[in-house]
Image (cartoon, coloured by chain):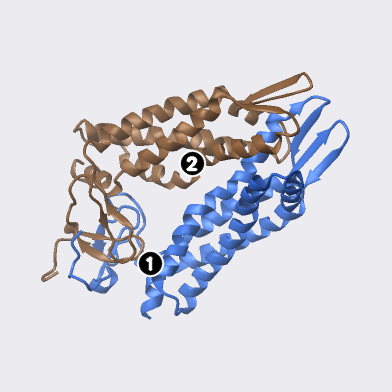
Chain colours: A brown, B blue
Amino acid sequence: MSTTPHLKDLIVCPNCDAIYHVAEPNFGERAVCQRCHTVLIAPRKRAGAQIICVALAVFILVLAAAVTPFLSIEAGGARNSVSVLDAALIFSGGPLILVSLGTVAMILFIPLLRVMLVIYVLLPVVADRPPAKNAAWAFSLSEALRPWSMAEIFAIGCAVALIKVADLAQIAFGPAFWMFCILTVLVVVQDSFLCRWSVWKSLETTK
Amino acid sequence: MEIARNDKIVTAREIGVVGCQRCTKVWPLGTKRCTRCGAQIVSRDHKALQRVWAWWIVGLICYIPANLYPMLQTRTLVSVQQDTIIGGVITLINHGSFGIALVIFLASVMIPVGKFLAIAFLALAAQRGTTSPSKQRMGLYEIVEYIGRWSMIDVFVVAILSSLVQLNALAAVNPGPAALFFGLSVIFTMLSAQSFDARLIWDAERS
């Protein structure tokens, strides 16, 4: 920083306030804050198209996982298998309905919403078009929702539930459980492909 | 990543600029809002600590009934059993499922309690200064951010079981009030951790 550099050539680590000159790494490399090791820039070749593909897969899987049963139970002739939507609709009153509503929001609606927002933001970027209307807002929302998207925790929850009642009744995984397992992997892949800095930059320069 | 000046870490504040925490763009000090992503910009968000404590206290308040009320009510032909969080763990141990007991104990007791302590420690360290190294506190903060969501697992298990185990007269599982309070407690502590301004971690060391 010999003289006052252009502000647009600088990047500030959001976690520790260290400031650096932007030196864009090559594809597949990562620029990491030297002080707190936060990943600042991590570009990937054709990341946009890949993320959109993964997002579409997630979208279909979440929809399919919503309606197919994730667990089925059998005891003494009585049988029951539930999908996530069943789980939501079974409570019809009382404050505990908040629990099921919250559950469904975190494992279905928020993942779905995030996927749609990501596609909405990235599609014009990948197609070399000007950013979609309110793309910055959409991407911010998608990022803010990231910790609240809990499909992977639900998958583990299914496994715990299965073992918890294993001695009470015969219980088996349904197709939705396996879809949630695949979902977990896809969401991790999608997040690791996504370079936030690159997205923000592309939303800015093509504006 | 090339650094601004070789080895010495320079912070944005020291050279009179401020970085957007959402999109890492750099602005002159005093800029109120990032026009790229629309986030509010503050060089150091000291009010953030008040938000941290506010969510922390609400989370702690919710954690008390979460432990006193039953989480799960299991009705079988012969008995009705109500389990609190700890009670559920003990039941699982009695049944010999040590693995699951450990998962639930970690997710519902160790992680929440650890989180309350960790956030309190980080906030106090930022307020009063500390001798503990910033790197360690940053590591702690990352763990808290990452692991906090996993506490939801117990709430999901309750939601799954209470929709699944509905076998008419034979057996039924219903959620207890603790499920709601526990879920709220997890949400509030997540918000508390998110409110924390990680940059304060690094300032505390310097002063």
Q: Nearer the viewer, residue B77 or A110?
A: B77
Is residue B194 in view from this perspective?
no
Instruction: Write the residue at 53% across / 59% down.
Output: B192
Mark 1 to mark 2 CA distance (whole Å): 25 Å
Residue B181 rendering spot, x and y as whole percentages: 68, 50
The kind of residue tagged 2 is: Ser
Q: Disc 2 is attached to a residue of which chain?
A: A
Taking A20 as reference, is A198 above or below it?
Answer: above
Residue B4 rendering spot, x and y as whole percentages: 18, 67
Q: Residues within 10 Å of mark 1 (few under 14, many from 20)?
A: many
In this rendering, position of residue A46 left or right of residue B94: left
Residue position marked by numbered label 2 in the rendering = A149
In this rendering, position of residue B27 left or right of residue A1: right
Q: Nearer the viewer, residue A126 or A164?
A: A164
Q: Nearer the viewer, residue B126 or B131?
A: B131
Residue A132 rendering spot, x and y as whole percentages: 28, 35
| Identity of the residue furthest to the right in this view | B78
Q: Residues within 10 Å of mark 2 (few under 14, many from 20)?
A: many
Badge 1 element = helix
Instruction: Write the residue at 35% across / 36% down.
Output: A118
